């Protein structure tokens, strides 16, 4: 089973691919959208379109564009948009986010939990800047070290120590790159636990519900491995911060 399919199944009950509660998502999105009723929103790595669908519901005169490499996730986003009646205001592109171009700038650019597509936080912000209208905002979510990572944490994440910094250093780097945080949210332990149990539980449930599927054993193994890597590795070590940013 490929990673895109695993991720899509794992996020069946948590379409926002980050450790964020519904309340946190609503607050972050309200701050990021700002008071403007019109304008365009871009999500670089939109997955199943969770952020964009909420943005379109919150601002009935906004339009949105989503970019992702997973065709299955985009199909799900399209189906959800049709069910919500917002499909005419949503454009979806099956494309590497690094290759996306558009002639018009966007008032809000998002990349939450997808900075790996650009090679890290600062390259993601550099890419977002190229799409941003004057006075626009960026909503970005990134990991950071809550504490010094153990070898078990690094192994579970498949990460190197230098891949992340602590929270203060992470924010300092963003500011040094010319951005001003105007709001932020640090995911709580409860949000992390809810996200990880949802991720592993949704994937395991799919395997149990489809025992004769040729990928059932792979899905169950992926859920079991992920759960072990989280509980015995990076739980309490990897943090997640979501920032609303503006340019100086």
Image: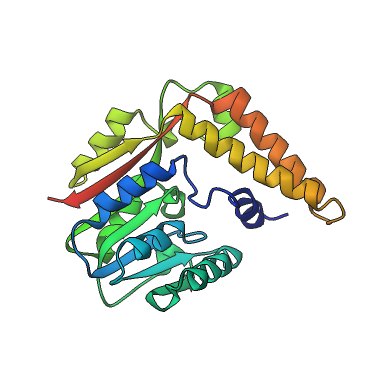
Q: Which residue is drawn at 67% across and 29% down?
A: 228
Q: Residue at x 72, y 43 (%)?
A: 204
Image: 79 above or below 161: below
Closer to the camera in the image, 26 or 3 = 26
* Place of residue 106 in the rendered image (x, y in percent of width and height, measured from the top left): 26, 67
* Place of residue 159 in the rendered image (x, y in percent of width and height, measured from the top left): 52, 35
* Place of residue 121 in the rendered image (x, y in percent of width and height, measured from the top left): 36, 46
Numbered label tally: 0
Is 77 on the left or on the right of 8, as rendered? left
Closer to the camera in the image, 43 or 179 = 43
Q: Which residue is drawn at 37% across and 63% down?
A: 57
Which quadrant holds the N terminus? bottom right
Closer to the camera in the image, 85 or 206 = 85
Image: 22 above or below 238: below
Image: 126 above or below 89: above
Res 196 quadrant in image = top right
């Amino acid at each position: 089973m490929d990673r895109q399919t695993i991720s899509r199944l794992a996020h069946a009950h948590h379409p926002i691919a980050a450790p964020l509660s519904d309340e946190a998502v609503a607050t972050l999105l309200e701050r990021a959208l700002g008071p403007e009723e019109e304008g365009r929103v871009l999500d670089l790595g939109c997955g199943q379109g969770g952020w964009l669908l909420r943005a379109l519901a919150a601002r009935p005169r906004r339009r949105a564009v989503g970019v992702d490499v997973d065709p299955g996730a985009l199909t799900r986003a399209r189906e959800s948009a049709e069910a919500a009646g917002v499909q005419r205001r949503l454009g979806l592109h099956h494309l590497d986010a690094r290759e996306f171009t558009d002639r018009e700038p966007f008032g809000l650019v998002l990349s939450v939990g997808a900075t790996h597509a650009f090679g890290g936080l600062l390259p993601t912000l550099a890419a977002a800047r190229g799409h941003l209208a004057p006075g626009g905002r960026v909503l970005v979510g990134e990991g950071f070290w809550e504490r010094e990572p153990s070898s078990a944490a690094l192994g579970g994440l498949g990460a190197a120590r230098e891949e992340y910094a602590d929270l203060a250093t992470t924010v300092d780097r963003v500011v040094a790159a010319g951005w001003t945080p105007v709001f932020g949210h640090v995911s709580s332990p409860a949000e992390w636990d809810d996200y990880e149990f949802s991720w592993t539980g949704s994937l395991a449930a799919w395997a149990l519900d489809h025992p004769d599927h040729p990928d059932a054993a792979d899905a169950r193994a992926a859920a079991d491995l992920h759960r072990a890597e989280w509980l015995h590795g990076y739980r309490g070590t990897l943090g997640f911060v979501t920032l609303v940013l503006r340019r100086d």
